[in-house]
Image (spheres, helix red, strand yellow):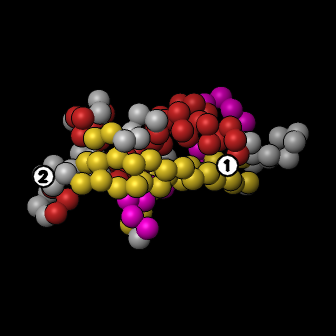
Amino acid sequence: MYEISVIQSFSAAHNLRAYRGKCEQLHGHNWQVEAIFGALNVDKTGMVIDFKVAKEMLNSVLCCFDHAYLNKTNYFKKVNPTSENTARFIFQNLARKVKKKKFRLLRVNVWETAGSKASYYE
C-alpha cells in the first residue's frame, strides 16, 4: 500500500454548543487539515496522486470554511462544530471527489492547535 498526504490550512471561528467552558464562547483557530490518500499501486508516472491535484481537491472542500464562522455554515447549523465533526465533514466531501479513482481517501486529520488533533476515516 502506498500513501501520500497533503496539509492545507484555513482560519475560522466557532463556538461549541452544549459545552461548559471557554470553548462555548466565540473563538477562532488557524486550522491545519491533512488528507491522506492511498493506493495498492502507483500510476504509470509512479504516483498515487499528484500532490498538486490532491491540494486542489482538499482546497475545494476547505474554501467554504476559510474566514468563516463555522456555526453559520449550512452543515454546522445543526451539527456541533467540533474538530471531530469538522474532520468527518471534510472526509465525506473529499471522498466524493475521489470516487471511481484508482486511489482512495484513507483519513483526514484536523488540528485546532499544534497539540490538539482529531481524525476521521471510514
Tell me the quadrant of the picture where the N terminus can be found. Answer: bottom right
User: Which residue in the protein does label 1 denote?
Assistant: 38
Which disc is residue 18 wearing? 2
41 inside magenta stretch: no
Above or below, comparing residue 90 to residue 4 in the picture = above
Looking at the magenta stretch, what is its main secondary structure?
A: strand
Q: Position of residue 49 (x, y in %)?
A: 73, 42
For the residues labelled 1 and 2, the Cα–Cα distance comes to 37 Å
- Can residue 73 be seen in the rendering of this structure? yes
Numbered range of the magenta stretch: 99-114
Quadrant for residue 79, please give it. Answer: top left
Above or below, comparing residue 10 to residue 75 in the picture = below
| Amino acid type, callout 1 | Gly
Residue at 42%, 54% in the rendered image: 31
- Can residue 79 be seen in the rendering of this structure? no
Residue at 25%, 48% in the rendered image: 14
Q: Position of residue 28 (x, y in %)?
A: 30, 53
Secondary structure category for the residue under label 1: strand
Dot 1, how many residues are within 10 Å of its Cα: few (below 14), some (14-19), or many (20+)? some
100 inside magenta stretch: yes
| Amino acid type, callout 2 | Ala
Left/right of residue 78 with respect to residue 42 in the rendered view: left
Quadrant for residue 29, please give it. Answer: bottom left
Above or below, comparing residue 72 to residue 34 in the picture = above
Q: Residue furthest front?
A: 67
Residue at 54%, 38% in the rendered image: 59
Q: Position of residue 46 (x, y in %)?
A: 85, 47
Dot 2, how many residues are within 10 Å of its Cα: few (below 14), some (14-19), or many (20+)? few
